[in-house]
Amino acid sequence: MRDLVIITDLDNTLLDKKTYNFKPAINTIEKIKSSNIPLIFCTSKTFAETLYFQKEMGIKDPFVVENGGAAYIPKEFCIKSVGAPKFEGNFFEISLGTSSEELEEFINNFSSSRKVEIRTFLKMTAKEISEITGLPVNLAILARERDFDIPFIFKGSLEDFGELKKEAEEKGYLIQEGGTFYHLSGLHTKADALSKMFEFLGKRFKEAFKIGLGDSMNDLEMLKWVNYPILVSGRDNPYVSSIKQEIKGIKIYEEQGPKGWNSAILDLLRKEGDKNG
């Protein structure tokens, strides 16, 4: 089998949208690990949340957080030494993002000046986040630890939202639509963080056949970046048409979350095995 790298979103992709479990994919995750195929999380989740799910699955590979706000490479990975990113704890950190404090200030100023209600994660309690997302409170606490990306609910008019996007662009910020929330960040995407991260990883990663799995518009650039893009949770997914227009030939699995993820990866591994048979 040729060298593979699997790059995956988490929410409503590898994780169930309501329960956040990954049970339907457990056996396939174990197969990936035993085959030494890197499994890179590329998510809107925070550093703390991502580490939590890595530990739950026994994954120790590099990962991208907060829609490309930063990438983290475990210290045991061989990386390019010249111009290496800063070392934080047990990880090399590659930061691309604008600080959450600056982003929150921008949203607060817009909300006050336009008299529009905008509910950000930082304005919500962990209990509120839990009620909206279905996250257990302990994970909702981790979800509030934002460094580079502000999830928010917008309660104004379409005209007001258009003005928000315009002012964000003028400031050099980006608004992306996720599965439940809008996200405000600096001008970076998941693909930007992956590109930067792969500069520091060895030949094994750079030359591998890259598979990407996602479910929404904030995965679009990541799905364009990989060699083999897959959209899961295709049934009743409002983003299918837009993503199909952007990525010709993208593979679509209608099953939700980890069921679709599992089917997609098993089909791919089967095809790879047939090629080597």
Image: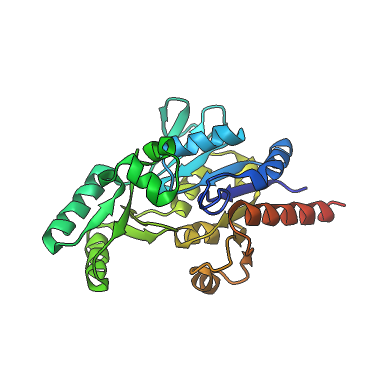
Image quadrant assignment for residue 148: top left
Residue placed most toward the observer, 15 or 222? 15
Q: Position of residue 59 (x, y in %)?
A: 60, 35
Q: Position of residue 78 (x, y in %)?
A: 57, 31
- Position of 208 with respect to 196 (left or right) is right
Which residue extends farthest left? 113
- Position of 191 with respect to 95 (left or right) is right
User: Would you say residue 84 is visible in this rendering?
Assistant: no
Total numbered badges shown on the rendered structure: 0
Image quadrant assignment for residue 56: top right
- Position of 218 with respect to 267 (left or right) is left
Q: Position of residue 192 (x, y in %)?
A: 44, 52
- Position of 163 with respect to 131 (left or right) is left
Residue placed most toward the observer, 121 or 136? 136
Residue placed most toward the observer, 54 or 115? 115
Q: Residue at x 42, y 28 (%)?
A: 87
User: Would you say residue 242 is visible in this rendering?
Assistant: yes
Vertical order, 86 against 44 (above or below): above
Residue placed most toward the observer, 141 or 203? 141
Vertical order, 162 against 221 (above or below): below
Which residue extends farthest top? 89
Q: Residue at x 53, y 54 (%)?
A: 12
Which residue extends farthest right? 277
Q: Residue at x 54, y 34 (%)?
A: 79
Q: Residue at x 55, y 48 (%)?
A: 15
Colour setup of the view: rainbow
Q: Position of residue 271 (x, y in %)?
A: 78, 57
